Image (spheres, grey):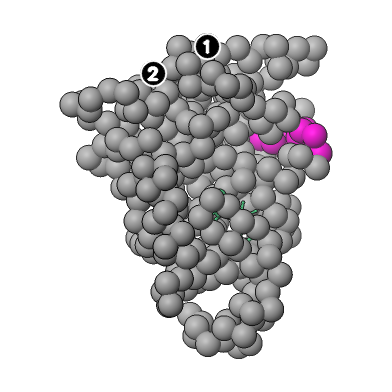
Amino acid sequence: MFAYNTYQLALDCGRRIGSGAFGTVIKVLSSISTGEFAAKGTKKDLFHARCKKYSLSVTWDTEATIMRAVGSHPNLVQLHEAHQCRGWQILILEYAESGDLLQHIVSNSCLEPQEAALLFAQVCAGLSFLHAQKVAHRDVKPENVLLKENSHGSVAMLADLGLARFCQGGCYSLVGTPQYRAPEIWFHKTTTCNNNGYDEMVDSWSAGVTLFAMLAGELPFDDEDLEARICKGDICFQESFQGQPLLDLHHVICCLVVMDPAIRFSSEEARTATLAYNLEKQGS
Ligand SMILES: Nc1ncnc2c1ncn2[C@@H]1O[C@H](COP(=O)(O)OP(=O)(O)OP(=O)(O)O)[C@@H](O)[C@H]1O
Ligand SMILES: [Mg+2]
């Protein structure tokens, strides 16, 4: 553990490495430890204003609470410290020097299937770790997957647990990024909820859309009527991959982006199927 003071000076001079709807992220150094860290700062009043605007029922300290509760995993960005001071929450996180997966997809137009499979299996491993503890991430998308390098190659880590939730009792709120949102989340916008709500299987849908984005360099649902298309199950992947050989990885997408969560691939099933694809490729 590090002392807060050791970061304080660095926070003033840190370079901004990212920002999202809720936070600004800067790179910081510790004076008592080698290595670089990322500090994600969220302003309390801004956070509450955003939640009100988008009718989100999440709290300011959800991210730190859930990260502490689930513990560490190689495919989940590590939380070193969390502080609240003068209306700010500051999370000191493991620094991912290769940026996020969206930046990586955009700079390459799209990813080669083998690289996509290696990264995607890790995303699924991180998700599977959360799901085993009944935590739904609820905002799986390439911007929330961070990349770093180690001696074995690229490591993909799930990040941004700001919308995550323990989901034993079912979730009901309309959260997440529209293009990646599972149909059962949309349904809860219009339905009077006397059923059991939705659960962590919403992440499987978003993971399928993420794998699609990795391979195609575009999104399957990105138009004005995306809600209608998603809720009708108007899903057609073939066009985007026309002219390419149909891969087992495309089959993984088709098993994840499935209307009925009861028959959708779980994160663990997706991880296993993607690992099998990797093994086959390494063996051939
Ligand atoms: N630990 C980190 N290392 C490197 N870059 C990071 C790190 N954490 C976040 N970033 C960068 O900052 C961006 C925003 O971070 P994050 O997604 O946590 O913020 P947010 O405000 O909660 O985002 P959202 O708009 O998805 O709710 C990420 O997409 C990534 O590019
Ligand atoms: Mg984010």
Farthest residue to the left: give it: 194
Mark 2 vs mark 1: give the one in front: 1
Q: State the residue in front, 238 or 230.
A: 230
Picture coordinates of residue 168, whole percent (x, y): 25, 41
Please tell me whether the stretch drawn in magenta is mainly helix, strand or loop: helix
Residue at the image point whose x is 38% and y is 60% from the top: 60
| Residue 136 image-quadrant placement | top left
Looking at numbered disc 1 in the image, what kind of residue is underneath it? Asp
266 over 59 or under it: above or below: above
What is the quadrant of the C terminus in the image? top right
**Within 10 angstroms of label 1, few (less than 14), some, or many (20 or more) residues?**
few
Label annotation for residue 234:
1
Could you say whether the residue bearing mark 2 is in a helix, strand or loop?
A: loop
Residue 261 shown left or right of residue 1 in the figure? left
Q: Position of residue 37 (x, y in %)?
A: 62, 71
Q: Nearer the viewer, residue 202 or 57?
A: 57
Callout count = 2
| Location of mark 2 (residue) | 260
Q: For the residue marked with disc 2, what is the amino acid?
A: Asp
In the image, taking residue 218 as reference, residue 175 lies left or right, namely left
Element under disc 1: loop
Residue occupying image coordinates x 47% and y 31%: 181
Q: Which stretch is magenta?
A: 108-117
